[in-house]
Amino acid sequence: MHAVSRRYDCTDTEQRAAGLIEAASALRRGELVVLPTDTVYGIGADAFTPAAVSALLEAKGRGRDMPVPVLVGTVRAANALVENLGPYGQDLVDAFWPGPLTLICGVNRSLSWDLGDAKGTVAVRMPQHPVAIDLLKETGPLAVSSANRSGAPPAVDADDAEKQLGESVSVYLDAGRCDSDVPSTILDLTTAVPRLLRRGALSVERLRGVIGYVATDAGPEPTG
């Protein structure tokens, strides 16, 4: 286990480069990393290391009944994780990725991983943040959840994340404060009609503008 958390200022070119190298190394060792995304800060682990995903859930104080989403650096990586994107997925990817849309699809059953009790599905997203994308292209898919203790507000800067998660995280990649505290929109593509599971940064109206009908029972639009 790491001795002490390390933090890198990703607004500084040299620190950004060093931080990405150190974060990738930590993830390969099964350790945890906090990274910025285009929504809120995330806590990430190697998606294919079950012990690392378990450590992520423990750091958050979260149970296996809430499986961890996966971030990818390319659409090709996403396609390798899912059984298929269904009749609507490719149009949504073309319209909104990279961006704040998480898609729930049937998982590629040949994969050897454990993200929690996902019931044969995976939640996948390609974020629109250069630090996140550079890290993901180096590491491959990462299991990433919002960087906060379960039940607390999502972290919108590295200070907030560090206060909540402390030295359970090896590396903090600090890219400044997020523009918003609104998380990604979550859309379930495993049903006959796409179903909104969480309202977020991408409005239902924009989704309907691409795929038509979207079933909604996820409460009001966020205002953050």
Image (cartoon, grey):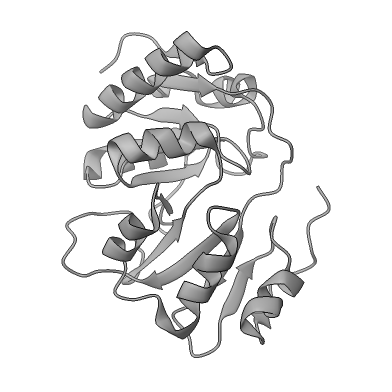
Badge count:
0
Q: Where does residue 121 sit, x and y in percent of width and height?
A: 36, 69
Q: Where does residue 131 sit, x and y in percent of width and height?
A: 49, 31
Residue appearing at x 47%, y 11% in the figure: 15
* 91 lies left or right of 224: left
Asked whether residue 116 appears in the rendered view, the answer is: no
Q: Where does residue 4 sit, x and y in percent of width and height?
A: 38, 9
Vertical arrangement, residue 184 with respect to residue 178, above or below: below
Q: In the depicted view, which residue is nearer to us: 145 or 136?
A: 136
Q: Quadrant of the N terminus?
A: top left
In this view, the residue farthest toward the bottom is 192
User: Where on the picture, by quarter, is residue 169?
Assistant: top left
Vertical arrangement, residue 40 with respect to residue 12, above or below: below
Asked whether residue 110 appears in the rendered view, the answer is: yes
User: Where on the picture, by quarter, is residue 167?
Assistant: top left
Residue appearing at x 26%, y 23% in the figure: 25
Residue appearing at x 44%, y 80% in the figure: 190
Vertical arrangement, residue 176 with respect to residue 210, above or below: above
Q: In the depicted view, which residue is nearer to us: 132 or 61?
A: 132
* 45 lies left or right of 12: left
Vertical arrangement, residue 183 with respect to residue 51, above or below: below
* 1 lies left or right of 145: left
Q: Where does residue 16 sit, x and y in percent of width and height?
A: 47, 17
